[in-house]
Amino acid sequence: MKDLMRVIIFIFGIFFIGCENIFNNESDPLTEQNIFVLCEGNFGQSNASLWMVNPEKTDIAGPIYQNQTGLSLGDIGQSMTIVDDRLFVINNNSHTIEEFSLGGEQVTHIKKIDLSGASPRHMAFYKNKGYITAWNVNGIIVMNLNNYTIEDTIPVNGLPEMILFHDNYLYTSVIMKPDWTADNRVIKIYNDGTISKSFEVVKGPGQMVIQDNKLFVASTYYGSDWSTNAGNSVIDLTTEKVETNDLGQTNDFGSDLIAINNTIYRSFKGGIAPLNTNLTIDSNHIIGKLGSAYSAAAFGEYIYLSETDYVAPDTVYIYDLAGSLIQHYQVGAIPGSFALFIKEID
């Protein structure tokens, strides 16, 4: 979900529901290279959807959850996390996590995890535990992924967004304060849940990526007149020095950061563009030719971009690293995130 201004009432509870596969999942076969596309859907309409493509093939599988259950995936498909042969899909406004098994020949839905009212966003994994950022908790839910019990909640006094695990530490961006005004923190957390350090970055920190022991942070925040502002930051995880560049009012930047061949890219205008050393954008080397890129990712030799008019069907485009269009696919409304699963095929 790229629109941050959601208001959700918090009533916290947790239930676990096994899902019998009452429909046929043979239409969702795994291949050697599987790119999952999660479409957010429209707020309040419960039309999130999950799709799967192989960039070297023209066919597409999906909507996967509907194929297997006959039901809607959820309300606002927020993000995906793959742990070994398990795919976790987080639904923000229906407050659920849907788990899929990737261990067989097909994608198979196996469990619904209900985080009633928590407003979950993103998940990181460490030693059989899922660390789930949750806006209505003002913190991070720690879940045992073996028995699905909640073991702890790590308070961050704000609305945590992206979360990463690196060198025995968790890092989370805190995008807004509890009153929903822009925050400017990235928090470093010991794996036991205690806070190690807080870094000040450009307001509205969201997506993060680590390269060469440096943590890059993309920020988006809003002015008093609701104008969009953007900025970039980098934290040297060795020296803990922070560099920032608030780029001010602009509508040119998306929220995604991508590492490709030792270069950090940010979604920009109709594609992605590399960051300069001063954290400005190199607009002379844009990859992608869309009217406006809604989301972006890169795996191996391919770049994945989406475009949306907020009504299904929307389109995902695949480019090679030279900027040539390779494939395009029609998917559900508002394709917002991508995930890669490599499977060994005998």
Image: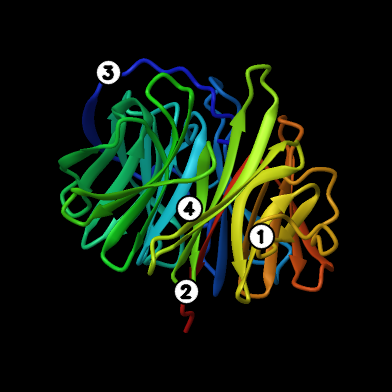
* Numbered disc 2: secondary structure: loop
Compared to 5, does 130 lie above or below? below
Q: Position of residue 337 (x, y in %)?
A: 57, 49
Q: How is the image coloured?
A: rainbow
Q: Is residue 178 above or below residue 168?
A: above
Cα–Cα gap, marks 4 and 2: 17 Å
Q: Which residue is mark 2?
A: 343
Task: Count residues near mark 3 (Cα–Cα under 10 Å), then give few for <14, some for 14-19, many for 20+.
Answer: few
* CA gap, disc 4 and disc 1: 49 Å
Residue 298: x %, y % from top left: 63, 64
Residue indicated by mark 3: 11
Residue position for label 1? 278
Tell me the number on the disc at residue 21.
none
- At label 1, which amino acid type do we have? Asn
Residue 294 appears in the rendering: no
First-in-chain label (4 vs 3) = 3
Point out the frontmost of discs 2 and 3: 3
Q: Residues within 10 Å of mark 4 (few under 14, many from 20)?
A: many
Residue depth check, mark 4 versus mark 2: number of the one nearer the observer: 2
